[in-house]
Image (tube, rainbow, N blue to C red):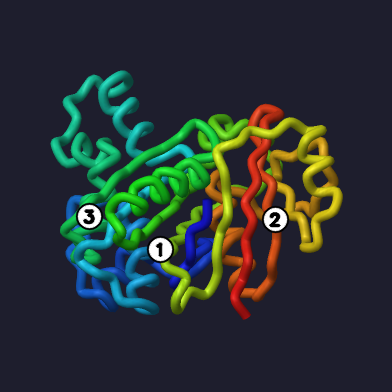
């Protein structure tokens, strides 16, 4: 399966001075009331993409995240089980995953299909598979928005992700406009539904002619230590390879199961 990338956007919040809520109000003139940081991050990434390419009102929208809105879950738990108070109505609304996709769609002027989905692993790749299947039928284009919000303090999200306290977790949003049409594309991403073993991966990459990049989770393989981590890192690696005009194979891993993304940049 191949999807062509028309354009991309990314934002990594590495101790940035940017206050996203203020940026949305000042630059994009968007109403940010009743929305939380998770929703703001998703909308911001989408607006950065809209700055670079036209968005059709009937483009399909897919929003995905590694662990979702951890802050609102923690807030809900504290409110109900510790403070024994009723949950505010807008906190309840923001707790629903499709609230995020609704606000992103509204900010982009998208009137068609919009979905919020999370897989317990390989969520970016699984969403690409969903998009490919849908576009084969609809013949439209799609926007994918992947985001992860680092909770403060970060111990909770590190525990959920199964990483050590020494690892650095950041907030990030990566978006792409995808199509089945190669014309005017800047890159392509190839993927499949297969799950590979470690031995199969070793054999598969043996004669690879491009750089092979391993996920942080690929403990059985040598890989360069990244200076940060978030669950939807695969989407960032796609954008990063396009930015550097590199062709790579990206190997992701979850509990000794492996998946492959093949990214080709059109130089």
Q: CA distance from mark 3 to mark 2?
A: 33 Å
Q: Secondary structure at mark 2?
A: strand
* Residue 92 appearing in the image: yes
Q: Secondary structure at mark 3?
A: helix
* Residue 152 appearing in the image: no
Q: Which residue is mark 2?
A: 249
Upstream in the sequence, badge 3 or badge 2? Answer: 3
Upstream in the sequence, badge 1 or badge 2? Answer: 1
Locate residue 266, reporting x and y percent.
59, 76
Disc number lying in front (1 or 3):
1
User: Which residue: 62% across, 31% down?
Assistant: 162
Identity of the residue furthest to the left in this view: 89
What is the number of callouts on the image? Answer: 3
CB under 8 Å between discs 3 and 2? no
Quadrant in the rendering for residue 267: bottom right
Q: Which residue is mark 1?
A: 179
User: Which residue: 53% across, 62% down?
Assistant: 12
User: Which residue: 14% across, 36% down?
Assistant: 89
Q: Nearer the viewer, residue 105 or 180?
A: 180
Q: Which residue is mark 3?
A: 103
């Amino acid at each position: 399966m191949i999807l062509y990338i028309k354009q991309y956007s990314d934002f990594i919040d590495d101790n940035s001075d940017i206050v996203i809520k203020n940026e949305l109000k000042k630059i994009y003139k968007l109403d940010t009331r009743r929305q939380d940081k998770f929703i703001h991050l998703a909308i911001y990434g989408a607006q950065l993409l809209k700055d670079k390419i036209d968005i059709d009102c009937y483009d399909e929208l897919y929003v995905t995240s590694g662990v979702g809105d951890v802050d609102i879950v923690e807030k809900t738990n504290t409110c109900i089980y510790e403070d024994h108070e009723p949950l505010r109505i807008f906190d309840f609304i923001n707790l629903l995953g499709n609230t995020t996709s609704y606000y992103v769609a509204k900010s982009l002027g998208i009137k068609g299909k919009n979905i919020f989905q999370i897989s317990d692993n390989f969520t970016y790749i699984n969403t690409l598979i969903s998009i490919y299947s849908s576009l084969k039928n609809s013949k439209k284009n799609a926007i994918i928005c992947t985001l992860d919000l680092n909770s403060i303090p970060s111990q909770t999200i590190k525990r959920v992700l199964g990483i050590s306290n020494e690892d650095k977790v950041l907030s990030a949003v990566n978006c792409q406009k995808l199509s089945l049409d190669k014309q005017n594309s800047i890159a392509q991403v190839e993927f499949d539904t297969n799950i590979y073993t470690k031995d199969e991966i070793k054999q598969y990459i043996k004669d690879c002619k491009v750089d092979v990049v391993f996920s942080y989770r690929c403990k059985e393989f040598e890989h360069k230590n990244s200076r940060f981590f978030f669950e939807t890192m695969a989407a960032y690696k796609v954008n990063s390879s396009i930015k550097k005009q590199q062709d790579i194979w990206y190997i992701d891993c979850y509990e000794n199961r492996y998946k492959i993304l093949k990214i080709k940049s059109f130089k």
